[in-house]
Image (cartoon, helix red, strand yellow):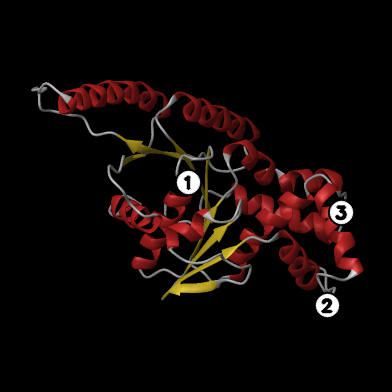
């Protein structure tokens, strides 16, 4: 997973995609890679697992080799207009910038291509060995990876169409891009993951995603079940474990991450996830 330049981590809300993103970023940094971790969706998840305050649009170095940022659409739009379109000197509070921001909010595909385009632009800038994006959840990720196609269909020619085609090629290139779907071995996350995988396969926008199952219980091998609360807990554990096996069979994950019993801070969870990926990612 860490041999690609762009890694998009998605999943149903609450399944731990931010923890997986942070864990992969920590492992990549540990291996000596120049890493940019990007929070593309709602703010807070990635920064919590890194143990920082709120992230900003400008990447900040959290530890040697590991930078992190929060995707801010208005800032990304200004950066795009300034660098890609040559419109220098725009102020985010100026009338022209506000007009473009309003357009990005309402026009089909504009908001999404600005967001996914920022991640792709960071890959092309070659400042990083790998860009790991805590991407939008499964219910939204399709519109983001399809954004370059949407723009290409709307814009017949010109610089914007050319840039959209380049983005499309990078997203579709299996040597550059990896998509990871995180799921819990439960009915709703598995069903939503399956629906997203089916749609992505039909649209052929990105390489076939890899699935990671999170919060997977270990099997209890001790046959003895003492009476009382301990025995009740063991019986419940076995029942939940058996139920998870059915959902795991449907998911066919490339890796299972353990259920972390006890109290852990988000930072501790990310560190444990990084350890689980050691030797496999």
Measured in 3D between alpha carbons, the distance from the residue under mark 3 to the one under mark 2, in whole angstroms, is: 19 Å
In this figure, which residue is indicated by the disc labeled 3?
A: 103
Q: Quadrant of residue 163?
A: bottom right
Rendered residue at 65%/51% (across/down): 169
**Crowding near the residue tagged with mark 2, few <14, some 14–19, many ≥20 C-alpha atoms within 10 Å:** few
- Establish if 137 lies above or below 219: below
Which element carries disc 1, helix, strand or loop?
A: helix
Q: Position of residue 269 (x, y in %)?
A: 35, 52
Query: Where's residue 226, x and y in %?
Result: 9, 23
Query: Quadrant of the rendered structure where residue 261 is?
Result: top left
Q: Is residue 257 visible?
A: yes
Q: Which residue is mark 2?
A: 88
Q: Tell me the residue at 90%/60% (across/down).
A: 99
Give the label, 2 or 1, closer to the camera.
1
The residue that disc 1 covers is 17
- In the drawing, does residue 126 fall left or right of residue 203? left
Secondary-structure class at tag 2: loop
Q: Is residue 14 left or right of residue 152?
A: left
**Can residue 2 be seen in this snapshot?**
no
- Give neighbour class at mark 1: few <14, some 14-19, many 20+ (Cα, 10 Å): many
Picture coordinates of residue 80, whole percent (x, y)? 76, 66
């Amino acid at each position: 997973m860490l041999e690609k330049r762009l890694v998009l981590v998605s999943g149903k809300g609450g399944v731990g995609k931010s923890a997986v993103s942070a864990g992969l970023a920590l492992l990549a940094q540990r291996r000596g890679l120049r890493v940019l971790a990007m929070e593309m969706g709602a703010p807070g998840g990635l920064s919590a697992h890194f143990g920082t305050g709120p992230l900003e649009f400008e990447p900040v170095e959290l530890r040697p080799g590991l930078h992190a940022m929060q995707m801010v659409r208005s800032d990304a739009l200004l950066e795009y207009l300034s660098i890609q379109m040559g419109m220098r000197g725009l102020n985010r509070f100026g009338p022209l910038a506000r007009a473009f921001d309003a357009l990005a909010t309402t026009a089909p595909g504009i908001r999404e291509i600005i967001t996914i385009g920022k991640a792709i632009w960071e890959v092309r800038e070659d400042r990083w060995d790998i860009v790991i994006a805590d991407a939008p959840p499964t219910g939204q990720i399709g519109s983001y990876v399809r954004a370059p196609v949407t723009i290409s269909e709307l814009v017949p020619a010109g610089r914007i169409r050319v840039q959209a085609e380049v983005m499309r090629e990078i997203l579709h290139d299996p040597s550059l891009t990896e998509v990871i779907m995180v799921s819990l071995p439960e009915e709703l996350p598995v069903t939503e993951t399956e629906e997203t995988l089916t749609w992505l396969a039909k649209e052929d926008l990105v390489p076939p995603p890899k699935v990671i199952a999170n919060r997977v219980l270990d099997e209890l091998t001790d046959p003895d079940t003492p009476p009382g609360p301990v025995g009740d807990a063991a019986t419940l554990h076995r029942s939940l474990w058996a139920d998870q096996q059915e959902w795991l069979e449907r998911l066919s994950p490339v890796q299972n991450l353990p259920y972390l019993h006890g109290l852990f801070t988000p930072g501790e969870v990310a560190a444990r996830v990084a350890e689980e990926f050691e030797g496999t990612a």
